[in-house]
Amino acid sequence: MSRIFSIYSFLLFLILVISSWGAFVSGSYFAPHTAISKIMGTRSRHFLVSKYVCGDSFFGFQELVIVLLIKMQNRVVWFDIAVSDLDRAKEFYSKVLDVELVDNEMGPNKMSMFPFEPGVASGALVQGPDYKPSAEGATVYLNGGEDLSVPLSRVEAAGGEVLLDKMSIGEYGFIAYFLDAEGNKVALLSMS
């Protein structure tokens, strides 16, 4: 039985590599997703790749497969945080998250973008006629790093207000909520 799984895994791996090559050449990350989904179905994809394709028998390919699957699995690709004073908001988030934001303009909107890498979700602070800060509605969860206590400890000094101190959400890590300097409710998420 294990030999059948090894042969089956190897065939799936070959399909993944062949389709990945096409994905790299075209800049699209859809091909590996399609190949695995057609064979195993959407629900089995994560188990299959982590258990068989990324197992110890395929040295060096684990990172490739994980990167490809992460890039095609993101459902959230960008977020805008509405602000009324871009300079104040930029200073707040720069202090809290210890990052440098990059200014940009798009039409009537001024923006300051969070650092990002291709294929990884990110976002921007946006000031414009259609952007109104709010503590209601959707909540953006920002990466709190190794331990969200660090950026959370900077919130009040930067002009915000902590709404919910660090709280465990079980196996999914920890969260905290705060109001930013503009009045938006925002969250932090970390695994410890």
Image: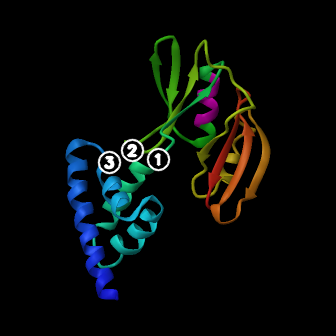
Res 142 → quadrant: top right
- Residue 14: where, in percent of width, then height? 22, 66
Residues under numbered marks 2 and 1 in contact, where contact means CB atoms less than 8 Å apart:
yes
Residues under numbered marks 3 and 1 in contact, where contact means CB atoms less than 8 Å apart:
no
Q: Is residue 154 among what the camera can see?
A: yes
- Residue 138: where, in percent of width, then height? 67, 36
Residue type beneath disc 2? Gly
Residue highlighted by disc 1:
74
Q: Give the magenta range.
A: 88-94
Say whether disc 3 or disc 1 marks the residue closer to the N-terminus. 3
Measure how far apart labels 2 and 1 are at the Cα level.
8 Å
Above or below: residue 34 compared with residue 102: below
Measure how far apart labels 3 and 2 are at the Cα level.
9 Å
Residue highlighted by disc 2:
119
Q: Residue at image x 72%, y 27%?
A: 134
As drawn, is 190 to the left or to the right of 44?
right
- Residue 21: where, in percent of width, then height? 20, 54
Residue 99 vs residue 126, the one in the foreground: 126
Residue type beneath disc 1? Asn
Q: Secondary structure at mark 2?
A: loop
Q: Is residue 151 among what the camera can see?
A: no
Residue highlighted by disc 3:
29
Residues under numbered marks 3 and 2 in contact, where contact means CB atoms less than 8 Å apart:
yes
Q: Secondary structure at mark 1?
A: loop
